[in-house]
């Protein structure tokens, strides 16, 4: 800073010593673990759904081996 210039105006606020401003890391850790557990449950549910989808895809491929899904057809083929 340049000599003779003030950085700011007013007074520095006094912190109330009865208020603990530091974060509660144990509480934050427990919240994070809870969120992690919920996320893992969602992932497990999605994995079960994926297994079902994989099963039905395999079944349909075996039942209709000559059918090609629209996303894999060439532009020259007739699309429904």
Image (tube, rainbow, N blue to C red):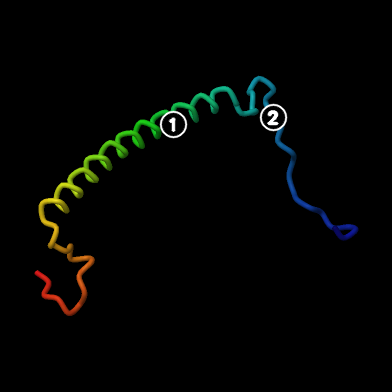
Query: Would you say 29 lies left or right of 45 here?
Result: right
Query: What residue is shown with label 1?
Result: 35
Foreground pick, 20 / 15? 20
Q: Does dot 1 land on a helix, a strand or a loop?
A: helix
- Residue at horizontal 17 percent and vertical 53 percent from the top: 61
Query: Would you say 14 lies left or right of 26 here?
Result: right
Q: Position of residue 4 (x, y in %)?
A: 89, 57
Foreground pick, 43 / 66? 66
Q: Where is residue 25 in the image (x, y as percent from the top left)?
A: 60, 26
Query: What residue is shown with label 2?
Result: 15
Quadrant of the image containing the C terminus: bottom left
Q: Give the mark nearest the N terminus, 2 or 1.
A: 2
The residue at the far right in this view is: 3
Foreground pick, 21 / 79? 79
Query: Would you say 73 lies left or right of 44 here?
Result: left
- Residue at horizontal 82 percent and vertical 54 percent from the top: 6
Q: Where is residue 16 in the image (x, y as percent from the top left)?
A: 67, 25
Q: Residue 63 carries which label?
A: none
Q: Position of residue 27 (x, y in %)?
A: 54, 23
Mark 2 to mark 1 CA distance (whole Å):
33 Å
Quadrant of the image containing the N terminus: bottom right
Examine the image and state in which quarter residue 42 appears: top left
- Residue at horizontal 36 percent and vertical 37 percent from the top: 43
Mark 2 Cα shell of 10 Å, populated few (<14), some (14-19), many (≥20): few
> How many dots with numbers?
2
Q: Does dot 2 land on a helix, a strand or a loop?
A: loop
Mark 1 Cα shell of 10 Å, populated few (<14), some (14-19), many (≥20): few
Is 15 situated above or below 70? above
Foreground pick, 36 / 58? 58
């Amino acid at each position: 800073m340049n000599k003779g210039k003030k950085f700011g105006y007013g007074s520095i606020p006094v912190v109330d010593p009865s208020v603990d401003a530091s974060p509660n890391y144990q509480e934050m850790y427990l919240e994070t673990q809870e969120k992690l557990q919920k996320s893992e449950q969602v992932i497990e549910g999605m994995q079960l759904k994926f297994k079902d989808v994989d099963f039905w895809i395999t079944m349909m491929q075996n039942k209709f081996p000559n059918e090609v899904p629209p996303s894999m057809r060439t532009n020259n083929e007739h699309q429904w």
